[in-house]
Amino acid sequence: MAKLLIRSVLVTGSSRGIGLELVKTFLNKRNPPGHVFAACRSPETAQELKSLASKHSNLVTVRMDVTDKASIEAAYDVVKETLKGHGLNLLINNAGIAIYHPVEETTAEDMMRLYKTNTVGPMLVTQAFAPLLKKAAQENPNEIMSCSKAAVIHISSGLGSIERVSIELFKDVLMEYRCSKAALNMLTRCQAETYKTDGIIAVTFAPGWVQTDMGGAKAPLKLHESVGGMMEVFETLTEIHNGMFLNWQGLAIPW
């Protein structure tokens, strides 16, 4: 990881699970970012984040509800003020929720709730922080497109692959989650086309079935394996990966 120099990163949904592990891993890098922004809905009750903040002066906890535009805009103001005129190199949209309903029990309300968090949330957050991402790209005009220049990473799921539905373990449940992640993948492709002229890449990642509150204890992947793998792949991302759907090992996943 020594090659990649990310000056600033923002991670949403950072109070637990994959988001918290991403924050920890960035903080423990040999060359950590000057600013690690850990965004979550209730930073005052996020005990692990509070403990980390007491030990790492480059960690800034930020209140953000990705379903609330006013909350996102307030978080943007905090990040912008902290960066003091500089841009944001890396935005990781990790916040997400799931409902384990059989297909027959899916309701319109549940479907809309997951879309609001898992798809609309990343859209609104990226729109809000786009000026800071563009600023970071402008600050490094001669640098190749990468996570150290300006990048958006969406944490999606292999369950969002339409092609792989019939071979997945959870094909009879999680329909709302699947649909929201498939839509997130399309959002990534659209953003990749939109922002590439600004020097920003957009990539979506499937972290695998991970041992988190959402994934459960039976998941085959440990947190450090998934996040460590993704962090290694972040090192390699360039313009050729723009708009791709990758797993935690960097392998392409069919749409």
Image (cartoon, rainbow, N blue to C red):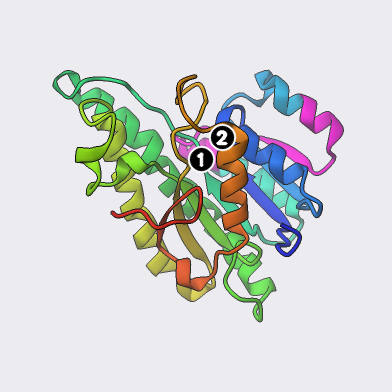
The quarter of the picture where the C terminus appears is bottom left
Q: Residue at x 24, y 24 (%)?
A: 109
Residue at image mark 1? 94
Q: Residue furthest left?
A: 104
Q: Residue at x 31, y 39 (%)?
A: 180
Q: Quadrant of the N terminus?
A: bottom right
Residue of label 2 = 18
The one of 24 and 111 positioned closer to us in this rendering: 24
**Is residue 229 something that shows in the picture?**
yes
Horizontal placement of 96 versus 135: left or right?
left
Q: Nearer the viewer, residue 204 or 42?
A: 204
The picture quadrant where one finds residue 56 is: top right
The location of residue 107, given as percent across then percent down, is 19, 22
Residue 39 visible somewhere in the drawing: no
For badge 2, the amino acid type reads Ile
User: Which region shows up in magenta?
Assistant: 51-72
Q: Please, is residue 18 above or below residue 81 in the view?
A: above
Which percent across, then down, holds residue 31?
A: 80, 55
Residue 73 falls left or right of residue 9: left
Task: Find the distance from the CA under tag 1 to the CA under tag 2.
Answer: 8 Å
Q: Nearer the viewer, mark 1 or mark 2?
A: 2
The disc at residue 19 is: none
Q: Position of residue 77 (x, y in %)?
A: 64, 46
Q: Secondary structure at mark 2?
A: helix
- Residue 237 among magenta residues: no
